[in-house]
Image: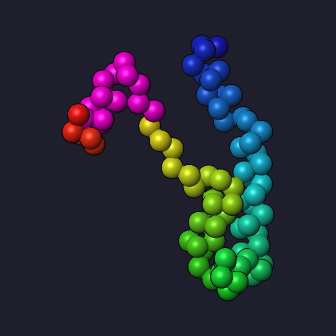
Amino acid sequence: MPPQSLQMIKKFNCLGCEMKKEKVHKVMSEYKEGTLKSSSGQKVTNSKQAIAIALSEAGMSKKKKKHHSAEDGSFLEERRRRFGV
């Protein structure tokens, strides 16, 4: 098996991913039962809001930042653009 496919298997078969899936499942089942409440204490009636709450609680809603390295030059370009250096 090529090393690249091994990395993909490790990426998607992590323990944390299973825990996140379980958390999302739990929150969505609360929504279906009608017991899910927002931070203000009101009952959630919108499915999109329930999905947002589920992803937030599972920690999957965080935006992943692009890593800039000094080697590719994008780091310096970004710095010049922001600070006028």
Residue at far bottom of view: 42
Write the residue at 70% across / 83% down: 41
Indicate the position of residue 54 as horizontal and vertical percent values: 67, 63
> Is 70 rendered above or below residue 14?
above
Please state which of residues 69 and 2 is positioned toward the viewer in this rendering. Answer: 69
Location of residue 57 by image quarter: bottom right
Residue at far left of view: 84
Q: Quadrant of the C terminus?
A: top left
Q: Is residue 31 left or right of residue 79?
A: right
Indicate the position of residue 7 as horizontal and vertical percent values: 62, 23
Q: In this orientation, does residue 15 appear?
A: yes
Indicate the position of residue 35 as horizontal and vertical percent values: 77, 80
Q: Which residues are magenta?
A: 67-80
Write the residue at 56% across / 71% down: 48
Q: Is residue 51 left or right of residue 81?
A: right
Location of residue 67 by image quarter: top left
Indicate the position of residue 47 as horizontal and vertical percent values: 60, 74
> Is 39 rendered above or below residue 73?
below
Write the residue at 77% across / 48% down: 19
Q: Quadrant of the N terminus?
A: top right
